[in-house]
Image: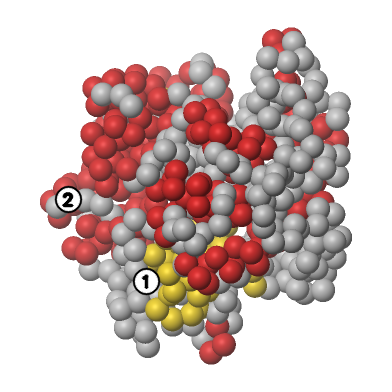
Amino acid sequence: MRDDEARYEAVTSRDARFDGEFFFAVVTTGIYCRPSCPAVTPKRVNVRFFPSAAAAQAAGFRACRRCRPDAVPGSAEWNVRADLVGRAVRLIGDGVVDREGVGGLARRLGYSPRQVQRQLTAELGAGPVALARARRAHTARVLLQTTALPVTELAFAAGFASIRQFNDTIRQIYAGTPSELRAAAGNGGAVARRTTAAAPGAGAGRPGDGFADRSAGGSADRSAPAGIPLRLAYRGPYAAAEIFDFLQLRAVPGVEEIRGTRGERTYRRTLRLTHGSGIAEVDEPAGPRRRRRPPAGLVCPAARGTDGGWLECRLRLTDLRDLSTAVQRLRRLFDLDADPYAVAERLGADPLLGPLVAERPGLRSPGAADPEELAVRTVLGGPPEHAAALVRRYGKPLDAADGGLTHLFPAPGNLTGAEVAEPVRTLCTALADGTVTLDAGADRGATERALAALPGVGPRAAAYLRMRALGDPDVGTTPGSDQEQGATAGPAAWRPWGAYALHHLWRAGLLPAGEMPIPNGTPIPDGTPRPDEGPGAGEPSGPREPSGPGEMPGAEDPSGAAEPPTYATAGRAG
């Protein structure tokens, strides 16, 4: 949406579809809001529009306390774009500026710091420092309202260099002191006192491991969650059952587990992070009838009604500096920044996909919590138990098992020894020495070509990794074919949402499980492995995993419910 008058119409109608796509500020009050803000609509003459929250903050506006514009889902535009700005935004969201500075961001992108600053300012109204500052402020607000950490510890955990910088930023963006912001959370204080175990070394009964105690037997208890409670917002409809099916069938024992019955599941996994490790828990939405109002300051206005919602999440980290990075990884895994309205508009016009989109609104394209882990699992192939064996031998054990979670997935550097079988060793060597990079800002085309060139990987697995590990929503189309410029149906007309088309086709059984197109659209030779089949042709491995949905070991829902559909078996090794 580029026209200011169209933006103002979205503000007037409080259209939650555009939350995160742009922000508006009111010059008479000095605040900025999301388009769906429930406050009285200001006069057009008093409204200014900004492409990012950081731009509004840089212009001197503070965040609205009613709609919390800093808590909106991210713009799907940054998932689609593969240019400098899109890559930079994804890297900033992953915490690169906080860890490596603007110089480190520029080196990763292959541009000078001045070029990065100029491009970001031109398109987003703010440079990398301002964008990272907005991210730190949001992290600080979450910590203030969900933990009982002392303010001094909290400031550094959020990424601020000094207490003065922290205080000044909170006053400027939220028009209050940190203490006032914490007090305004209301019942957030009670939540905070239950979540102090999220701080490093606070795990009762397990000194120094940084994780909270679980009840006897490690049973999940949604009524008394441990860790930092978060609401991971999304826009539009969200097909939660399908994405939990997808993750359940691929859960690697020791690293991931699913608890509960279909419709009330909790996905749990360990996370290998920059400063330490963590455990994440994400609940399957129970439906509008059971939703409870979240603590003050954590509500997403778009979640009221059918236009959006949130996933309840709890994070327990050994080092709170990893909070925002962990959140971004979970958002990518659950594809929470997607724009289902744009996807439905494009795919719904296709004669084949239209009925599928109408039947399953909000179907998402799952990403990866750890791209390197996904790459190893995809190339290793076979059922999740194959990856579990690798985890038990090379993964780092947790200080104490947490239910079914016992290890961190091994880093690539730990899988380069001569005892590691090919092609996993070659892949991990390339990841460890930087020949192949799978971070959020990687050049998707170059990375796919580098992966496809590795022995035992091939074009099909490379395309699958481009879709999931790199989060590219445009995988599955065939550029340059079908008279792309004028195509009204078929893969060329699906762009840039080809990945969602693939998931719809897999789900409906109209495309063989794991079938991945390759960039030039030519047929893939017989014998070339699919992502769920493991190593390349001629590479020895364990027994291949059956491809039929009913043949797969462990396909049955542990609760005894009907097994998930064909869609959930595609690319199962990842």
Query: Which percent across, then down, holds residue 510?
Result: 86, 39
The quadrant in which residue 315 appears is bottom left
Query: Which percent across, then down, holds residue 290?
Result: 67, 66
Q: Secondary structure at mark 2?
A: loop
Query: Which percent across, then down, holds residue 463?
Result: 63, 36
Residues under numbered marks 1 and 2 in contact, where contact means CB atoms less than 8 Å apart: no
Q: Which mark is residue 161?
A: 2
Q: Residue at x 81, y 53 (%)?
A: 547
| Whole-number angstrom distance, CA of label 1 to CA of label 2 | 22 Å
Q: Residue at x 72, y 24 (%)?
A: 521
Q: Which mark is residue 166?
A: none
Q: Residue at x 60, y 49 (%)?
A: 379
The quadrant in which residue 96 appears is top left
Q: Residue at x 50, y 75 (%)?
A: 406
Q: How is the image coloured?
A: secondary structure
Mark 2 burial class by Cα count in 10 Å: few <14, some 14-19, many 20+: few
Residue type highlighted by circle 2: Ala
> Number of marks in the image?
2
315 over 219 or under it: above or below: above
Q: Secondary structure at mark 1?
A: helix
Q: Is residue 546 visible?
A: yes
Q: Pick the residue in front: 303 or 150.
A: 150
Q: Which quadrant is the N terminus positioned in?
A: top right
245 over 210 or under it: above or below: above
Query: Which percent across, then down, holds residue 21?
Result: 50, 31
Q: Which residue is mark 1?
A: 198
